[in-house]
Amino acid sequence: MGTKVTVEDYKGWLRLRWSYLGKRPTLSLGWKDSLPARAMAKKKASEIEGDLITGNYDPTLKKYRTLKTPKSDLTVVALIEQFSTSKTQLAVTTKSKYVSLRVKAKEFFKEGRVLIDIDKAQSFKRWLSESLSPVTQVQHIGLMKACWDWGIKQGLVMDNPWGEVLREIKVPPKQKPRPFTHEEIKAILRQGCFILNGSPRIPVEDARCGLKAIDNPREFRLLEIAYTH
C-alpha cells in the first residue's frame, strides 16, 4: 500500500491526496496556496504518512482536520503595528497614513484576530465608505493588502483577502479644471488684469480685479490672440 501524501493546488486552494485501500481520499485544508500554507500542509502530509506506516491512520479524517494556523492569536492591530515598525524610513505623510489606518482598524476590529475572510474584509471596506472618500478608502485598503502580503512572507498569516476588496473600490475620475468663459476673458482684456511671467508666458492673478490665475498655456494663447487682434 502506498504511503505517499501529496500536496495539491485545487483552484487556488490547497488539499492533500493519497491512496488507502484502493481509494483516493482527499483532505481540503481551507487555505489559499502560499509558501507558508504549503509548509504547514507538508507537515500535515507527513503526519498522515506516518500514521499510514504505523497503522494509526484515521479513515474518518477527523484526526487531521484540526490544523492550527500560524500566529492564530495575532490581532489585526498588532499585525499593522509590526508591519509599520518594519518600515524603517517613512516620510511624515506616509507615517500619518499608517497611524490613521491603525486607528480605524482598532475601532472596527477591536481585538479581532488576523484570521479574517473576504466577507469580513468587505465589511471593513463598507464601514470605511461611510466616512471616507474613495481615494482615502483605496489608501487604507491598499495598506491592508501590503500589510497582509508582508505577513504572508513572515509566516504570520496564511492568505490575503484584501486584493479583491481593493479592486472593488471605484474612484471617480478627476474633473478637468473649468476653462475661462467668454465673459471672464472679456473682463480680463478690458481691465488688463494679466501680466506676462516668463516662458511659457502665463498671466497671473491681479489683486485689484480678483480674477483667477491662468495656468493653461492654451488658454493664455487664446487670450494673447484676442488681445492682439
Image (spheres, grey):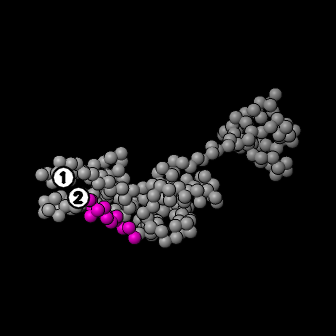
Q: How many marks?
A: 2
User: Which of the two residues, 72 or 128, is positioned nearer the viewer here?
Assistant: 72
Q: Position of residue 85 (x, y in %)?
A: 43, 67
**Mark 2 nearby-residue class (10 Å; few <14, some 14–19, many ≥20):** few
Q: Measured along the vertical axis of the image, is residue 49 above or below residue 189?
A: below
Is label 1 in contact with label 2 (beta carbons under 8 Å)?
yes
Q: Secondary structure at mark 2?
A: loop
For this rendering, which residue is in front, 118 or 130? 118
> What residue type is disc 2 on?
Pro
- In the drawing, does residue 31 fall left or right of residue 221? left
Q: Is residue 95 found left or right of 25 in the rendered image?
A: right
Residue topped by disc 1? 20
Question: What's the magenta bit mostly, secondary-structure-wise?
Answer: loop
- The reply to whether residue 175 is in sight is yes
Q: Position of residue 90 (x, y in %)?
A: 48, 62
User: x, y percentage for residue 67?
Assistant: 31, 64
Q: Secondary structure at mark 1?
A: loop
What residue is rendered at 41% in x and 69% in y? 74
User: Which span is picked out in magenta?
Assistant: 60-73
Residue closest to the eye, 218 or 26: 26
Was residue 71 drawn as part of the magenta stretch in this picture?
Answer: yes
Which residue corresponds to mark 2? 59
